[in-house]
Image (cartoon, helix red, strand yellow):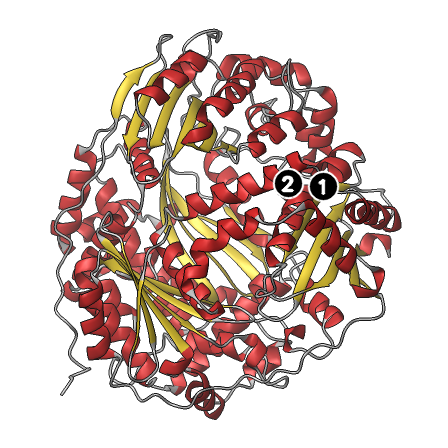
Amino acid sequence: MLNRQQPPDFKQVSTINFIQPEKKVLDNGVPVFTIYSGEQDLVRIEFIFENVNWKLEKPLQAIAVNSLINNGTIKLTAKEIAEQIDFYGAFFQTEYVQDQSLVTLYTLNKHLHSVLPIVKDVLSASQFPQHELDIYIQNQKQKLQVNLKKNDVLSRKEFAHALFGNTAYGVNIKAEHYDALKREDLIEYFKAAYAPNNCTIVVSGKFNDAGFNLLNDAFGKDWEKSNAVKNSFNFSTKDKKNIYIEKPEALQSAIRIGQLAINRKHEDFSGLQILNTVLGGYFGSRLMNNIREDKGYTYGIGSGISSLQQAGYLFIATEVGADVCPAALQEIYKEIDILKNERIGEEELNLVRNYMLGSMLGSLENVFSHADKFKNIYFSGLDYSYYTHYIETVKSITAEELLTLANKYFTTENFTEVVIGRK
Amino acid sequence: MVDFNRFTLANGLKVLVHEDATTPMAVLNILYDVGARDEDPEKTGFAHLFEHLMFGGSVNIPSYDEPLQRVGGENNAFTSNDITNYYITLPAENIETAFWLESDRMLSLAFSEKSLDTQRNVVSEEFKQRYLNQPYGDVWLKLRPLAYKKHSYRWATIGKELSHIENATMDDVKAFFKKHYTPQNAILVVGGNVKTEEVKKLAEKWFEPIPAGEKYIRDLIQEDPQTEARQETVKANVPLNAIYMAFKMPGRLNEDYYAFDLLSDILSRGQSSRLYNSLLKEQQLFSDINAYISSSLDPGLFIVEGKLVEGVAIETAEKAIWAELEKLKTELVSETELTKVKNKVESVLVFSEMGLLDKAMNLAYYELLGDAALLNQETGAFLKVSAEDIKRISNETFNPNSSSTLYYLTEKNA
């Protein structure tokens, strides 16, 4: 007779294999890291540029250049670029994040030789036509208006600004910033940032010598160097702020609270990730159990720790029924207090260990995820021993050590608290 | 190419296995052939509320999530107008835990009052978060009843109104479970680092003892052909005027489905598409413009939606959309343009094979469509579409008398 009350036997994940990259260098010195996998005949090529030359009076320079980079070169119009990329079934994506600007090409290998020259043209000869800039300004301002109607978006902006002030990490973008965008500023930034000496290429997929030669032919020459200064910021750790923006008609309030913390380079980072998982980092977390599954105050609540190159921060975020906002806040602080005052029980801690190891294994789904894992460490100046340390920490950290970490990093008296809606 | 093996258990549960030795993980995906279209008009939002209750403990296992997390697994689910789909990913060596959990909740739920209470609240908050407290969040709550008058697609999966969820009773929950959550109404897909023989043994052990239950015979009221243009205007606290146009199109199994999919790509996939270039870039009438299909099993909708540039009259914007649609009715799409969207689709299909969960979900869905092998014939089906097909379906579809148009206006203009 089948006993359905008895769980099947299981094993903790024992080994996790990372595909490490092979490093080569283009003729002009651009490093190329290749994470190889031969299963599908396709490739992802990421051109990664550090953000540089930060100027507070021109906070959108880097973002606008990244968005508009494929909107016309000396040879091709915006439409021609898009048509050619699409004709080969390729994908050209741009992404701006706090520390870097990325241009990513996804393509089937059979079209690599056709699309690489287009990408080269874009990265070396983009023109930022005035009429494209005008359309961009008009449409971005409209998008901003819509976004500012979203309480969670507003809470993110306010929170980042409270923590990071007028730096690239925290500047509060307003409509007038778009109006102030000038074509000359975009060209200047483009020349400074999108240069071979500021570029790292990460390739993942079925990429062999022939592919590398194509890449070298396109990007290893005829690409001007620049003098750019990588962004650098300093942040103070004790700037507690309380921000409440009332929205009288809100059905829900967006809550975001937290503080500056450490980033991936710090030896406590892995331990803090475990603590974060317990608090609000997975579906079974304490915040989810209490505030969603027990109280039904919200559709979802979570916590996170974020690692930037020059800072780290931890946060708790949710959207809750406006009438239960004060109660929800109280419960969040209560859960943090418990984390700081009581050892995590063995059963819960073992569950979290297993969950995190399974989650790490599952996050290595395909060759692109392996490349992402490489980028995490490489751009933090770390090597694969980071992951060895992470896995060891997850397996062996004690409840006592976690209690110490909770008291060290969750200093709620320094928490910035943002509420948008009603409370 | 997504390979699979297939067998059926004695109680009618269909099982598909996709072996992929390149990953240390496994996926267990279970699709129940029930969605919001199967709901009572007075109890809408129920299929989705029920999905939440599936995580509130089953007859022999008080907590669903905890034992799964303990073996390194994760899970989630979604409900659409057509289906409810549950999935687990976990280290392949612990796959039996997924069978244990998933089979117990197919056997029976715990039906706890506490869980029902909580999930009613959680879903109410979800309703607010996604539909009521967002700019333009309630568009589909307005557009569906405009486009559908009889068919149960006239309400969204979240339900018509909050009160339907707030009034759900335990008797409703039990009846819904008995009617829809049977082995005969489900498709199980196991993928990843597994072997078919092993999956078969586990399926027989955990799922086969579950009683077959009664087969649910779907008999939905179908929509009458639309013969008049429909128009509605709403005003709300949003910053920009927007327009939503919905045209009737055939269901997912119709042979023209692939032509419709390419038609929406021609209009709006990426920065080389027609609507983007003509309406956003050249005429600068919209700051955001999109076309897409609802891909529903019963006759669905072809949607064109956009947010207007401030100062543009909504009639002007609407006329410009019509002009683009008229072009498709009178001029053949060029070979280059058609090849472009076909190449793009081919790429998308190859890239989608990189995700284990995507593959498992697709197998389950195509098996529901009639045969999982259809998944591997998709590229061929897209390649067969001709320029004449695009012109023909445009003529069949883009007519004022089969359109439903929603003006979503800012109160600033009121």
> According to the image, label 2 marks what residue?
B338
Q: Estimate how packed mark 1 is, as few (under 14), some (14 to 19) or many (20 or more) residues with alpha carbons within 10 Å.
A: many
Mark found first going from the N terminus, 2 or 1 = 1
The structure residue drawn at horizontal position 42% and vertical position 12%, both measured from the top left corner, is: A217
Pinpoint residue A75: horizontal percent, then vertical percent. 64, 15
For badge 1, the amino acid type reads: Val
Q: Which amino acid does label 2 sit on?
A: Leu
Whether tag 2 and tag 1 are in contact, CB under 8 A, the answer is yes
> Which residue is pictured at 61% across the width and 59% down the height?
B257
Both marks 2 and 1 on one chain: yes
Residue A50, placed above or below residue A169: above
The x and y percentages for residue B266 are 66, 43
Pick whichever, A384 or A347, lies toward us: A384
Say what secondary structure mark 1 lies in.
Answer: loop
Residue B282 in the figure: left or right of residue A163: right
| As drawn, A119 above or below B291 | above
Q: Can residue B66 be seen in this view?
A: yes
Residue occupying image coordinates x 42% and y 25%: A48
Question: Residue at 65% of width from left, 25% of height from top?
Answer: A80
Quarter the N terminus of chain A occupies: bottom left
Relative depth, front residue between A48 and B195: B195
Badge number at residue B333? 1
Where is residue A263, by image quadrant? Answer: top left
Instruction: Identify the mark at residue B298; answer none if there is no mark.
Output: none
Q: Could you tell whether A326 is left or right of B14 in the image?
A: right
Q: Is residue A106 left or right of residue A383?
A: right
Residue A167 percent coordinates (x, y):
50, 28
Residue B308 locus on image (x, y percent): 77, 45
Is the residue A283 above or below the residue B325 in the image?
below
Q: Mark 2 lies on which chain?
A: B
Q: Mark 1 lies on which chain?
A: B
